[in-house]
Amino acid sequence: MAVFTPVSLEQLSDWIKQFPVGRATSIKGISSGIENSNFFIGTERGEYVLTLFEKLHIEQLPFYLELMRHLAQRGIPVPAPVANDKGAIVNLLNDKPAAIVSKLEGESQLSPQPVHCASLGDMLARMHMAAKDFKIMQPNLRGLAWWLETTPTVLPFLPPELGRLLETEVQYQKEFAATSAYRALPRGPVHADLFRNNAMFVGDKLSGIFDFYFAGCDTWLFDLAVTVNDWCVDLDSGVLDIERAEAMLAAYRAVRPFSDAEREAWQPMLRAAALRFWLSRLFDFYMPREAEMLTPHDPAHFERILRLRIKETPPAL
Ligand SMILES: Nc1ncnc2c1ncn2[C@@H]1O[C@H](COP(=O)(O)OP(=O)(O)O)[C@@H](O)[C@H]1O
Ligand SMILES: N[C@@H](CCOP(=O)(O)O)C(=O)O
């Protein structure tokens, strides 16, 4: 994560007194990621992750943090938010809403094999089931409405052929969202950004999934499509690795079988998932923000993935 808002050990030491984690002993900015300011912090009780929310509004945060608490309570390995002495899990730090969550063990698996993809498929399905009774409703804020709003902002920066691809796909997704097949898709709270860098493994064992700050209520299939488009592709070409994709789909299906509507919507959803990240990367590329450390993401990667998902038949659900 880039650090947009610096926090000193002195500032942290004062702020952290309200939490039952003991005295702060260290703070270190995390350079990966592009949305929030994240820090590893050490305290007398252990290690945690401190996040300062840069763009999200304070009224949106309970959805993410309460969802993490809900999932953690149901045995899904996600960071558990720490409440302060008044029971609040979001508190201002340096004028930004901020939260402390438990630190997951392990490392990201950036070269996943079928065994890792199967673990993700299994966990994603279990997460969807565990979130079914979550009470707070918040739409996916990077869904169709955002695509429609953001496309005109990036279009002026694009060469004509890319602009046409973008406009055509947004129109296709708008029409697909009005079909009965789309409306019949099962839905609920979804992660919506479950990339390789948002899961931890200890050896080959999945130790947790994190970064719920794009989560929202959307179709379960969209969530699976986002996950397949990252975990089961060749990163240079965007081409689907069938063995990895089938391992993920089989593990997901073993927990929650797919419906007919989902089978019908699978290819459009893979396209939607590619479009979503192509558009957000274009937006971040042409409208960058100031940051102390910033790792930009390449929009062309998801343009390639979108072109491929449009023309190919995906592995069956
Ligand atoms: N709860 C956590 N446990 C362990 N590491 C974490 C945790 N949260 C974040 N990280 C680390 O911080 C990095 C950036 O966090 P992330 O949530 O992806 O940032 P952003 O919201 O900006 O995308 C991750 O890649 C991971 O290394
Ligand atoms: N996964 C998205 C960007 C969101 O950043 P993250 O570090 O929070 O996953 C992308 O790759 O475009």
Image (cartoon, rainbow, N blue to C red):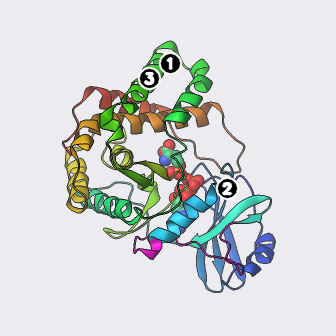
Q: CA distance from mark 3 to mark 1?
A: 12 Å
Which image quarter: residue 112? bottom left
Q: CA distance from mark 2 to mark 1?
A: 34 Å
Which image quarter: residue 222? top left
Q: Which residue is mark 2?
A: 59
Q: Amino acid at mark 2?
A: Glu
Label 3 environment density (alpha carbons within 10 Å; few <14, some 14–19, many ≥20): some
Q: Nearer the viewer, mark 2 or mark 1?
A: 2
Taking the spot 61% from the left edge, 75% from the top edge, the residue there is 82
Q: Which residue is mark 3?
A: 171
Q: Amino acid at mark 3?
A: Gln
Q: Which residue is mark 1?
A: 163
Q: Which residues are magenta?
A: 72-90
Q: Main secondary structure of the magenta part?
A: loop
Q: Which badge, 2 or 1, is on the more N-terminal residue?
A: 2
The one of 4 and 128 positioned closer to us in this rendering: 128
Asked whether residue 132 appears in the rendered view, the answer is yes
Q: Which badge, 3 or 1, is on the more N-terminal residue?
A: 1
Taking the spot 40% from the left edge, 39% from the top edge, the residue there is 273
Discs 2, 1 touching: Cβ within 8 Å: no
Instruction: Using the image, determine if residue 254 lies above or below residue 12.
Output: above
Q: Is residue 286 left or right of residue 312?
A: right
Q: Nearer the viewer, mark 3 or mark 1?
A: 3
Q: Position of residue 290 (x, y in %)?
A: 72, 43
Verify whether residue 88 appears in magenta.
yes
Q: Residue furthest top?
A: 160
Q: Is residue 59 left or right of residue 17?
A: left
